[in-house]
Amino acid sequence: MRVHLDAGICQGHNRCYALAPAVFDVDEYGQAVQRIDDELPSELEARARLAAANCPEYAITLTD
Ligand code: SF4
């Protein structure tokens, strides 16, 4: 699974960081950034799904 975070629609709520800090980080402007561009380790997939489901802007896409 891979994560794609659309920075153009992210509003910086940082729910993703709260739910999956191993997958997302927060930059100096308070916007979310993804930590992992490559294939996610399988142990992080559940957290990534949780973050995507709780992003109010639908800014997180997961692909297999
Ligand atoms: S939860 Fe969504 S909108 Fe909020 S910081 Fe994360 S990616 Fe951006």
Image: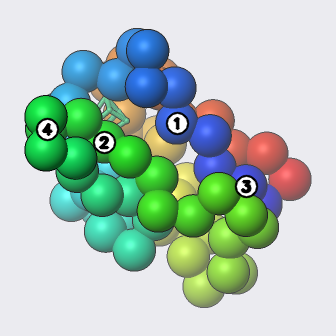
Q: Position of residue 20 (x, y in %)?
A: 36, 65
Q: How many marks?
A: 4
Q: Residue at x 13, y 34 (%)?
A: 29
**Residue where numbered disc 2 is placed:** 32
To which quarter of the image does residue 63 belong? top right
Q: Amino acid at mark 4?
A: Gly
Reading the image, the residue beneath label 1 is 5
Residue pointed to by mark 3: 2
Say if residue 12 shows up in the picture.
yes
The residue pinned by badge 4 equals 30
Q: Quadrant of ligand 1?
A: top left
- For image coordinates 67% across by 81% down, the residue present is 41
Residue 24 image point, x, y percent: 38, 58
The residue furthest right is: 64
Asked whether, in this view, residue 63 is left or right of residue 44, the answer is right
Label 1 close to label 2 by CB (< 8 Å): yes
Q: Which disc, if any, is residue 37?
A: none
* N-terminal-most mark, 4 or 3: 3
Q: Are marks 2 and 3 in contact (CB under 8 Å)?
A: no
